[in-house]
Image: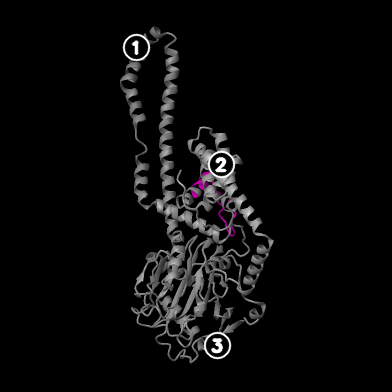
Amino acid sequence: MVVRQVLGLPSKPVYQAHTGHFIYPEVRVSTHFSSTQKLKDIVHSVFLIIMCMIGHMTDLLYTEKDLVTSLKNYITAEENKLKQVKQWAEKLDVLSAIAMQDPEGFLGNPVNAFKLMKRLNTEWGDLESLVLKDTKEGFISNLTLQRQHFPTDEDQTGAAKALLRLQDTYRLDTNTISTGDLPGVTHKSPMTVEDCFELGKIAYSEVDYYHTELWMEQALKQLDEGEESTVDKVTVLDYLSYAIYQQGDLGRALELTKRLLMLDPEHQRANGNLKYFEFQLINQRKAQAQEAQKAQEEGKERRKRLTSDASKKKKRFREPVPERKMYEMLCRGEGIKLTPRRQRRLFCRYFDNHGHPKYLLSPVKQEDEWDRPYIVRYHDIISHGEIEKVKELAKPRLRRATISNPITGVLETAPYRISKSAWLTAYEHPMIDQINQRIEDLTGLEMDTAEELQVANYGVGGQYEPHFDFGRKDEPDAFKELGTGNRIATWLFYMSDVAAGGATVFPDVGAAVWPKKGTAVFWYNLFPSGEGDYSTRHAACPVLVGNKWVSNKWIHERGQEFRRPCGLNETA
């Protein structure tokens, strides 16, 4: 028996959907990690699998639609062929019945004799050709042609991992996902036993016994409820009992193994596991009894002292919430740290950027989203027509997104950042130039040294773990190739509403900003002194349901010398 290492996995999820929102931050972002943090975040990223961009996945729907049409044509051709064969058989059946009543008398008719010769010499040959006619050629040719566009095993595994990540981040229980009762869903799609089993099997292959247990239990539940399936209970129980054993619950693993053997008494592996689990359970109970006896012998005084020491330690030090946990809490709408007193300082206003001529008579709507770091949202700042034009220009050139290497400054892809993005320059279309000018008018910052407008589309499961937009002191070459200094500020357009998920969250300060079509958010990454504002470390929550389009502008230091003068205070 092969015993794999037990994984440290999260607690059982509990579904909550009072906010239902996630996001996917901008694309070409430099990332900062200490050597330890870098390793930790990359390890997290290995398990971060993001589903393909929705815009490209729609092509697969059209491919499948074409194949269904081709398949229906094949079925129609086969049905027509069988109809002809059936008609021929029925006609001959009637004729044979008449002929066999008086064979000699029947053949005494020269017409009948001629027709018999004709049938056997010609018509049966025609029937043979009809039966042998290959009607599947068109369908097979089309299937072969379209297969080059099919997802791979790796793509399927990636989609499964994305679904499991969503389950953890949003604490969705398996039954909620299986029945399709997700928040914001308009196209409900329940999962079959085969679907649940496949998810569990993929988790099992990744040595993720926690999710193996969840999805094998769901598959077993649906089988117990009478759902018909090609997957049998014995197979499900085999996976489930082993996954539970790997998580240390020997009693339950033994119970499930016994249930399996009731269904299949000759199951070789289950019979072996039964003996092994019973042996391990006896040893476990002996060890627990010895520990209990030892604890009792140590006396009440020692237990009191330990309790007292633990209490004191707890009072002296309150362990901070880990960044990953805070990130997931914020994605669910939990853990937001804006107190009522601070919230009273946030306002909405009509904004003309200190009397800018363009906005004196038609100021824009500005809303304070957060105080530290100061994040503002502009409402109705980009029209539906502009959004559609930006998407139209971006779609043909969407490519895998890149990040700026913190050591070399070179743009490269990264395993923790998988998305599709495109860059639009001002000279490509007058509308892009107008959008850039709008950002300059409202921020007062120079756009000539800013990066081009970046457009990104993130599908279900798309996310990006906590990162900085600016380059830190230990990354002196972060934007060396651009020659425009560090990223002083970030402007982010939300070009779509998201049915569920997709928030931009700031784990260090407990802030969450939700996407709203037609709005934009803006914040400074650097203090006026040029020092980085580490409270701007942010992340993109995964899209649970829907499709998110964003576009962003990273504004650089060069050219801002007189627009945002340097301050003397390092962090103010």
Assess disc 1: are there few (<14), some (14-19) or many (≥20) residues with their C-alpha within 10 Å of its C-alpha: few
Query: Quick one: label 1 or label 3, which is nearer the N terminus?
Result: 1
Q: Which callout, 3 or 2, points to the residue nearer the camera?
A: 2
Local SS, label 3: loop
Work out whether residue 232 can be spotted.
no
Which of these two is toward me, 518 or 305?
A: 305
| Residue at 42 percent of width and 90 percent of height | 561
Residue under label 1, please give it: 110
Q: Is residue 45 left or right of residue 342?
A: left
Assess disc 2: are there few (<14), some (14-19) or many (≥20) residues with their C-alpha within 10 Å of its C-alpha: some
Query: Quick one: label 3 or label 2, which is nearer the N terminus?
Result: 2
| Residue at 34 percent of width and 13 percent of height | 113
Residue 21 point in image, percent of width and height: 57, 65
Local SS, label 2: helix
Residue 133 point in image, percent of width and height: 34, 33
Alpha carbon separation for disc pair 1 and 3: 106 Å
- SS assignment for the magenta stretch, majority: loop
Look at label 1 and name its amino acid.
Answer: Pro
Q: Which residues are magenta?
A: 179-199
Residue under label 3, please give it: 360
Q: Which callout, 1 or 3, points to the residue nearer the camera?
A: 3
Q: Is residue 357 left or right of residue 349?
A: left
Alpha carbon separation for disc pair 1 and 2: 86 Å
Look at label 2 and name its amino acid.
Answer: Glu
Residue 545 point in image, percent of width and height: 54, 60
Query: Quick one: label 1 or label 2, which is nearer the N terminus?
Result: 1
Residue under label 2, please give it: 278
Colour basis: one colour
